[in-house]
Image (cartoon, helix red, strand yellow):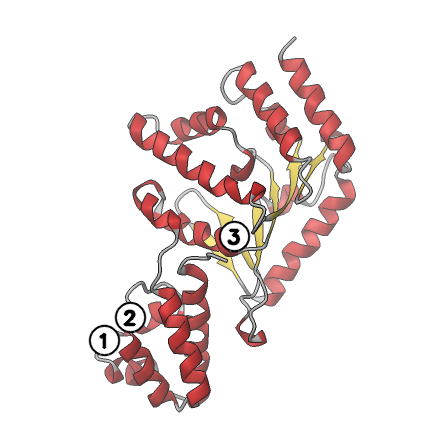
Amino acid sequence: MATGSTLPRRLLGRELHDLRENAGITMDVAKKAISVGKQTIWRMETGQSFRLRLIDIERLCQVYGATLEKTEILLGLTEEAQGKGWWHAYGDAIPKHFDLFVGLEQAAVRLTTYQAALVPGLLQIPDYRREVIWAEFPQMDTAEVERRIELAARRQDRLTDDSNPLQLDVILDELPLRRPIGSPEIMAAQLRHIADVGRLKNVSVRVVPAAAGTHPGLLVGTFVLLEFPKHPTAHLTEPPVIYVQGYTGALYLEKPDEVQQYRDAYTRLQRVALNEADSRRLILEIAEELTR
């Protein structure tokens, strides 16, 4: 499975942090061991460093008192982390805070999301996405807009990838289905696309109808839960991550209690959402209204 460098970097970082903490060694000692700044150690431990050298990882393992087996595992992760995923070719089209998300999305086996304002990116058609981009960046060059459209299409390939399909579970408010993004024809096409993709065996789309009134999603807001495949070495399995996008950045929540709160919120949303068949029926009814 091609996961690019994102997942191995995060796994490596977590292992380095735990080794250092268990050894009672400060970042100041660690930075001197490989002649770097404290910020570099922090970036390595949080999986944000793209400049990982085998010699540095081996030296840190020595300083931390890692076993030979542990050292070999970390060196293996370092080699994996030096690779690049396909999305790095779109670096100019990916907002800085979103690069990490795209890497995690490609590594994930399941993505669960609640969307209150817009159709989720993995379900957006090009015309709809174009309107959203122009709303945020009205002066953006057409070539850059199309570059982002191309990136979105590559991300959506996971939904129909027979060898490595992404399980996608979506709960949508009725509002984004009725909010006019572009022309009525664009919205109708977008809604029919959602209904079509929702028929895939690895995709579930459910709608919280306006008639539901007050519900947990109004308080929780839009979020994405990413879950990852099991690693052959159990403790190296990447834990679930909650992604919450803001206007100027994003939050990645990983603490078990935080993740559980969002899981609980999603469970409550499932109780007020229509089932898949009724959701599809509502989506197509709205599409029909737009083309009358």
Question: What residue do we see at 60% from left, 37% from top?
Answer: 116
Label 2 secondary element: helix
Circle 2 residues within 10 Å: few <14, some 14–19, many ≥20: some
Figure check: 262 above or below 272: below
Picture quadrant where residue 201 is located: top right
Label 1 secondary element: loop
- Dot 1 or dot 3: first in sequence order is 1
- Pinpoint residue 50: horizontal percent, then vertical percent: 31, 63
Tell me: 57 left or right of 156: left
Question: What residue do we see at 72% from left, 45% from top?
Answer: 269
Picture quadrant where residue 281 is located: top right
Circle 3 residues within 10 Å: few <14, some 14–19, many ≥20: some
- Dot 2 or dot 3: first in sequence order is 2
Q: Residue furthest front?
A: 163
Mark 2 vs mark 1, CA separation in Å: 6 Å
Picture quadrant where residue 187 is located: top right
Specify the label residue 11 is tagged with: none
- Pinpoint residue 52: horizontal percent, then vertical percent: 30, 69
Mark 1 vs mark 3, CA separation in Å: 30 Å
Figure check: 242 above or below 90: below
Question: What residue do we see at 62% from left, 31% from top?
Answer: 194
Q: Quadrant of the C terminus?
A: top right
In the rendered image, which residue does mark 1 sit on?
36
In the rendered image, which residue does mark 3 sit on?
243
Q: Residue furthest top?
A: 292
**What's the amino acid at mark 3?**
Tyr
Q: Quick one: 172 or 79, which is closer to the camera?
A: 79
In the rendered image, which residue does mark 2 sit on?
40
Disc 2, disc 1: CB below 8 Å? yes
Figure check: 289 above or below 96: above
